[in-house]
Every structure is written in structure tokens, then in C-alpha cells.
Image (spheres, rainbow, N blue to C red):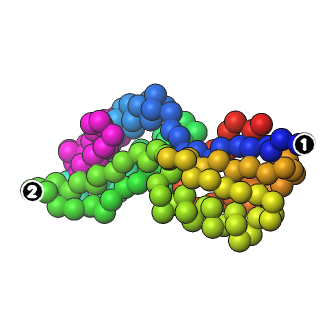
Amino acid sequence: MAKDSTFDIVSTVDKQEVSNALNQAQKEVAQRYDFRGTGAEVDYSGDKILIKANSEERAKAVQDVFGSKLVKRGISLKSFDAGEPYASGKEYRIEGVIKEGIDQPTAKKISKIIRDEGPKSVKATIQGDELRVSSKSRDDLQSVIALLGDFEDADLQFVNMR
């Protein structure tokens, strides 16, 4: 009897790469002429990222600098969830978080896509903050990976192919 082949769908971020991107963004913001005197800065506390500047446009520009550093470090912008700029005293702030793991609504959405559009022999099981996909055919698993390749709600990685 043939054993099922499986793989896991996860959403992970390398914290060291996030830290490196943050340090690079802080250096660039400190050195760039257009950010001088604007109070522009990027801070990291725990799992929250705080962007500050004296105007909404400057805060968005600092967010763009940080986003470009994340992309250069191989971290998808789908993993960085930034809020809207809001006024706090004389400065504008943007709070953001680095998302890790697949939350329940997203996991249900992925398993529904696999059920509806994937091969019939494939089963998806939600296990905490990841999904396990199993099938008798490895080709069916490859087609599921191709199907989810352009999933826009989260940065997905496919690991532990057995």
C-alpha cells in the first residue's frame, strides 16, 4: 500500500534579517538630506515597528525606505503589516508588525482554495499556525504548490516535502 506524500505550508520570517533591514533603514534615514530636521526615525520594540516623522508624507517615505530594505533582505512585504499614519502630538506615526504564522481565517481560505481548485485527491489539514497538505500523488502536491504560488494574503513557504 502506497504511503501518502505530504508537505507543510508555513509563513515564517527570519528575525535576524528583519533586524538587519531595520538597522540599514535607520542608517539611511539618519544620513539622507531630505530627512534632516524632520524627526524621521524607525524603531523596533518587541514585535512592533514604529515609524515617526513630522509629516504624514515623511512618515510614508520612511516606511518606503524600510520596505525596500526588507525586500533587499529577501523578506516579502506581505509579512509587514503597517497601519495608517496618525497624528501624535507634533509628529505622525505609523505602527506596523511583522506577521508570522498563518492565522485561522487565512488558513481556512487556503484550504478552501485547495478543496475547490486543487486535485480531488489532495487533503489540507490545519495544524496550529501551519497547514499540512497530503495526497497519494506527488504530482498533485506539485500542482497545489503551483496553485498557491501567487497567493496574495500571506507570504507562504512550502516545507517538509515527503
Q: Position of residue 94 (x, y in %)?
A: 28, 54
Element carrying mark 1:
loop
Residue 87: give its label: none
Q: For mark 2, does the 10 Å Cα neighbourhood hold few (<14), some (14 to 19), or many (20 or more) residues?
A: few
Q: Position of residue 7 (x, y in %)?
A: 71, 43
The relative height of residue 131 versus residue 113 in the rendered view (above or below) is above
Residue 23, quarter of the rendered image: top left
The relative height of residue 65 versus residue 87 in the rendered view (above or below) is above
- Residue 40 is one of the magenta-drawn residues: yes
Of the image marks 1 and 2, the number of the one nearer the N terminus: 1
Name the image quarter holding the C terminus. top right
In-front residue for pair 40/126: 126
Q: Position of residue 85 (x, y in %)?
A: 27, 61
Who's the residue at 33% across and 59% down the image?
83
Residue 68 can be seen in this image: no
Looking at this rendering, what residue extends furthest in the bottom direction?
Answer: 116
Who's the residue at 76% across and 64% down the image?
118
Looking at this rendering, what residue extends furthest in the left direction?
Answer: 89
Report how far apart the C-alphas of labels 1 and 2 lie in the structure: 68 Å
The residue that mark 1 highlights is 1
In-front residue for pair 95/12: 12
Residue 56, quarter of the rendered image: bottom left
Who's the residue at 69% across and 50% down the image?
133
In-front residue for pair 109/134: 134
Element carrying mark 2:
loop
Q: Is residue 58 left or right of residue 81?
A: left
The residue that mark 2 highlights is 89
Q: Position of residue 135 (x, y in %)?
A: 79, 51
Report the magenta residues as a range.
30-53
- Residue 90 is one of the magenta-drawn residues: no
Q: Is residue 31 left or right of residue 107?
A: left
Residue 41 can be seen in this image: yes
